[in-house]
């Protein structure tokens, strides 16, 4: 729908940000491809917003460089970078109608009124807000405000769209719905999306690639599947999905709860561990079983309820089985 | 009791004693003045009719309104810049500026008025200096005219203009300005399209406050106007203390009161007054 952008790849080169002596972002390098949906995922305080603000141009870069299509933009002021941005809390203009909010970027660029009207209509349709064009932001629900913010940021067809926890203020059910819409809009406009969140489910379901951040540095970069299947350390394995950590021959392995088989005790010679069931929690699609293993550790197992009809009870003796490729060897840290 | 609170917010019961006291102490005298204006010296609207007949009265009212408008214009404009600087500078400088602002509230209006005479009078610092270095032959008439009154009044009013603007600017969400810049707006576009509209309630509050306070100005016009600039407040005092025409004085007071109420009413048609005075927008 938007005119395809020739630009939109972003190069982050050894970027750091110092607040006084505190390093909020620490030597980050990242190649962001044109048109990709890239998520910065990390706990609160890991430097996601700071990195995004440096990309947007609201914060100076202390060390390193940021380039758009290989041309440095470190010294380009925020208003000249032409990056769209959806702010945390949206930051809509409260005194303007939805239409004027969305058309603002074109209006400050002094485009002809007819062009603005046409483009705003197009954006209103994209975010399904046609009948709300003349309302003020305060008269909209949180989800609608979020869509106005998105339309406003996309209206001038920016090469890159930056989103800082855009769904943070929405309730759970609405969030899943908006995730779908956001993903759909990304497909249709082809803009590079850089998306900040601390919600791992959001990151897994939406991203082409995820950057996991901790304490201002990158822990691991990869597709959702790569990160989920091949975490390189305990932090990534624990932050993205759930994981058991198994010590074996002085090495640590990550083992996802759904990759373990539970059998009644003593029936299997190739059991890796044995233990007793401490608790069973029913989640509808699956059951979460916590097992006190004989080596003193606690193991979480997710069982498909549908295929395992035999009922487990607290105190049952069980064997734990898994295949070699289920356990992923981790680096230290 | 529960039946009562169902219709009346319990908050009202708490402030009720104060409300009664304020009514008695404020409304009483005001009603008395309205009463005087239609009964003294004789019953009827004779006092109000004078407004249409007496050129002197019309001139006084017009002078007052003109001076108040100019004072308000300058005070609010200058106050806006000062408030802007205060809100957007560093914390330390902000504290200095806030202290200076408060100090100016504590200095008596008499002191502030007379110091202008020392500074800008015929034998004041400025004129003497300019004469000494030969820039002028005759002293410039800053004082004892309308210019003097305006200088004194604007100077006195600026801190009052600053306060509502300060409140309004401090409550702004600055991310909205970031959003404007991010969308490609220059600094001046952001100011005219976003910052100024969002601080309009502060401007209205500041304008109302300064204009209404200016209407009642007495000391400054009397001292700096040198008897040539007669404003309503001074005229009322003359009627009360010298010529003893209490009816005329009461009439002018009533006119001022109604003027102020009319202004508030007009404003209230454009925006909710509670937002102007710092209440929530919705
Ligand atoms: N303006 C600032 N001054 C000092 N420290 C800051 C500033 N902004 C952020 N920080 C610090 O930098 C770290 C990263 O913050 P932020 O980027 O907001 O994290 P995130 O968005 O991942 O939650 C935090 O420890 C935060 O306290
Ligand atoms: Mg953040």
Image (cartoon, helix red, strand yellow):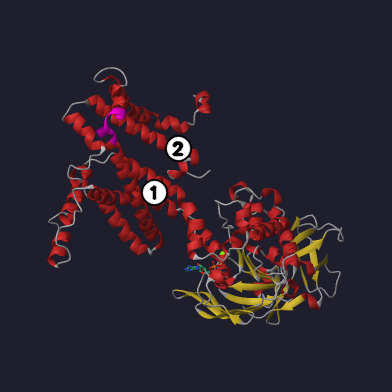
Of the two numbered discs 2 and 1 on the same chain, state the one appearing first in sequence.
1
Counting from the top left corner in percent of width and height, residue B79 is at: 35, 54
Counting from the top left corner in percent of width and height, residue A276 is at: 75, 64
**Chain ID at mark 1:** B
Quickly name the residue at label 2: B266
Q: Is residue A264 visible?
A: no
Looking at this view, is A87 or A128 the one in front?
A128
Counting from the top left corner in percent of width and height, residue A173 is at: 71, 53
Looking at this view, is A309 or B227 the one in front?
B227
Looking at this view, is B95 or A191 the one in front?
A191
Q: Splitting the image into 4 quarters, where does residue A249 fall? A: bottom right
Q: Residue at x 29, y 31 (%)?
A: B253
- Left or right of A198 on screen, residue B86: left
In front: mark 2 or mark 1? 2
Q: Is residue A94 visible?
A: yes
**What's the magenta region?**
B51-58
Q: Which mark is residue B164?
A: 1
Q: Respond whether the residues carrying marks 2 and 1 are from the same subunit.
A: yes
Is the residue marked 2 within 8 Å of ligand 1, measured from its CB? no
Task: From this view, report whether residue B79 is shown above or below residue B223.
Answer: below
Report the label total.
2
Q: Around disc 2, counting alpha carbons within 10 Å, would you say few (fewer than 14), some (14 to 19), or many (20 or more)?
A: few
Most frequent secondary structure within the magenta stretch: helix
Q: Residue at x 46, y 50 (%)?
A: B200
- Disc 2 is placed on an element classified as helix
Task: From this view, report whether residue A220 is shown above or below residue A197.
Answer: below
Counting from the top left corner in percent of width and height, residue A52 is at: 58, 70
Q: Residue at x 45, y 47 (%)?
A: B201
3D distance between C-alphas at marks 2 and 1: 19 Å
């Amino acid at each position: 729908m938007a005119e395809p952008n020739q630009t939109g790849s972003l190069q982050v080169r050894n970027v750091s940000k110092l607040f006084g002596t505190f390093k909020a972002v620490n030597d980050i390098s990242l190649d962001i491809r044109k048109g990709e949906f890239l998520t910065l995922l990390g706990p609160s305080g890991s430097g996601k917003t700071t990195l995004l603000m440096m990309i947007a141009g609201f914060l100076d870069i202390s060390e390193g460089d940021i380039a758009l299509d290989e041309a440095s933009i470190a010294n380009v002021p925020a208003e000249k970078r032409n990056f769209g941005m959806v702010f945390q809390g949206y930051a809509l203009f409260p005194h303007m109608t939805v239409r004027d909010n969305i058309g603002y970027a074109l209006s400050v660029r002094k485009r002809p009124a007819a062009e603005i009207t046409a483009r705003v209509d197009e954006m209103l349709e994209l975010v399904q807000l046609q009948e709300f064009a003349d309302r003020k932001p305060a008269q909209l629900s949180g989800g609608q405000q979020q869509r106005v913010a998105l339309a406003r940021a996309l209206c001038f067809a920016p090469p890159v769209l930056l989103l800082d926890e855009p769904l943070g203020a929405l309730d759970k059910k609405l969030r899943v719905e908006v995730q779908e819409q956001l993903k759909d809009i990304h497909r249709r406009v082809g803009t590079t999306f850089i998306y900040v969140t601390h919600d791992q489910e959001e990151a897994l379901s939406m991203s082409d690639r995820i950057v996991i951040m901790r304490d201002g540095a990158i822990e691991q970069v990869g597709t959702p599947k790569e990160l989920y299947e091949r975490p390189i350390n305990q932090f990534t394995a624990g932050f993205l999905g759930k994981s058991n950590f198994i010590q074996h021959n002085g090495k640590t392995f990550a083992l996802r709860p759904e990759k373990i088989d539970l059998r009644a005790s003593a029936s299997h010679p190739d059991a890796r561990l044995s233990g007793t069931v401490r608790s069973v929690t029913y989640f509808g699609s699956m059951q979460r079983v916590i097992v006190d293993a004989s080596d003193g550790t606690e193991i979480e197992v997710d069982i498909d309820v549908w295929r395992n009809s035999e009922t487990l009870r607290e105190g049952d003796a069980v064997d734990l089985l898994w295949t070699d490729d289920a356990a992923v060897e981790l680096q230290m840290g | 009791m529960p039946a009562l609170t169902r219709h009346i917010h319990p908050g009202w019961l708490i402030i009720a004693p104060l409300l009664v006291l304020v009514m008695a102490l404020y409304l009483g005298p005001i009603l008395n003045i309205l009463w005087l204006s239609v009964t003294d010296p004789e019953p009827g609207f004779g006092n109000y009719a004078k407004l249409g007949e007496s050129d002197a009265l019309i001139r006084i009212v017009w002078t007052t309104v003109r001076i108040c408008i100019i004072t308000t214009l300058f005070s609010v404009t200058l106050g806006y810049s000062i408030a802007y600087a205060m809100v957007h500078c560093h914390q330390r400088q902000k504290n200095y500026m806030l202290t200076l602002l408060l100090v100016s509230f504590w200095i008596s209006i008499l002191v502030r008025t007379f110091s202008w005479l020392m500074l800008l009078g015929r034998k004041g610092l400025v004129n003497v200096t300019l004469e000494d270095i030969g820039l002028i032959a005759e002293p410039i008439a800053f004082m004892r005219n309308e210019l003097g009154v305006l200088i004194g009044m604007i100077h006195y009013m600026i801190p009052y203009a600053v306060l509502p603007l300060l409140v309004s600017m401090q409550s702004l969400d600055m991310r909205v300005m970031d959003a404007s810049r991010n969308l490609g707006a220059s600094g001046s576009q952001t100011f005219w399209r976003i910052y100024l509209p969002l601080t309009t309630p502060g401007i209205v509050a500041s304008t109302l406050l300064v204009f209404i306070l200016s209407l009642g100005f007495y000391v400054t016009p009397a001292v700096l106007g040198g008897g040539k600039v007669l404003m309503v407040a001074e005229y009322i005092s003359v009627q009360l203390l010298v010529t003893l025409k209490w009816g005329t004085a009461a009439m002018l007071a009533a006119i001022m009161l109604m003027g102020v109420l009319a202004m508030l009413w007009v404003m209230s048609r454009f925006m909710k007054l509670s937002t102007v005075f710092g209440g929530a927008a919705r």
